[in-house]
Image (cartoon, rainbow, N blue to C red):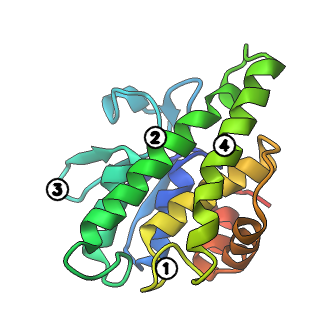
Amino acid sequence: MKLYYSPGACSLADHIALIEANLSFEAVQVDLKAKTTADGANYRTINPKGYVPALGLDDGAVLTENIAILSYIADRAGGLAPGGALGCYRLLETLAYISTELHKSFKPFFSPGAKEEEKGKAREVLGKRFALFEDTLASQDQLFPEGFTVADCYLFTMLFWAKNKAEVAVPPRLSAYYERLSGRESIRKALADEGIV
């Protein structure tokens, strides 16, 4: 497999998940401005959308979008999804919330022409949306009682952005969760592999 990523982008979630799952993969850095891979290939021939992540499978198929890639990884790695009859649906529910309500709300921080007023509104929205996880983390260390899942990989990435790119106030339990996860081996390795200190 090949993970197409950009350092510190949302593809960090997939990078963490692949390491956590102990799946064999090659990480291929993408220049998102030039739309080229590290070896100069046209990235749009791999992912016509032009952004990361993309996961090239061994049979030549390519998956894009975090929800799809993280679900794929969870399906191939026992223990990275919650159990029970509704486990896979609860995972999709959480991934969808992170993608649509958190991830998309960061847009002003990555748009060169965004005004400070837009960023201020985004910080307010993100603060409210992050707060949803405070109750969850009152009784457990991760998002699901079964333990660490691919949803934790994605939420960690959003918290990384909140703390390092957007200066979003993070509620206390969520901040403690972020600090705990920062010490996790898979996360430390992914950050190091991407050159993020």
Please tell me whether mark 2 sits on a helix, a strand or a loop: helix
User: Whole-Å distance between the Cαs marked 3 and 4?
Assistant: 39 Å
Residue type, mark 3 in image: Asp
Q: Earlier in the sequence, mark 3 or mark 2?
A: 3
Residues tagged 1 and 2 counted as in contact (Cβ below 8 A) = no
Amino acid at the residue labelled 2: Thr
As measured in the structure, the alpha-carbon distance from the residue carrying label 4 to the one carrying label 1 is 23 Å
Q: Position of residue 100 (x, y in %)?
A: 46, 40
Residue 196 x %, y %: 74, 57
Which quadrant holds the C terminus?
Answer: bottom right
Check disc 1 and report the residue beneath it.
148
Q: Position of residue 175 (x, y in %)?
A: 76, 66
Q: Which mark is residue 59?
A: 3
- Coordinates of residue 61 in the picture (x, y in percent): 20, 48
Q: Which residue is mark 2?
A: 100
Q: Residues within 10 Å of mark 3 (few under 14, many from 20)?
A: few
Q: Nearer the viewer, mark 3 or mark 4?
A: 4
Report helix, strand or loop for mark 1: loop
Q: Rounded to the nearest whole Å, what is the CA distance between mark 1 and mark 3?
A: 29 Å
Question: What separation in Å lies between label 3 and label 2 (alpha carbons)?
Answer: 30 Å
Residue at x 26% of width, y 63% of height: 89
Query: Label 1 near label 4: C-beta < 8 Å?
Result: no
Return the residue nearer the eye: 150 or 48: 150
Q: Earlier in the sequence, mark 1 or mark 2?
A: 2
Q: Earlier in the sequence, mark 4 or mark 1?
A: 4
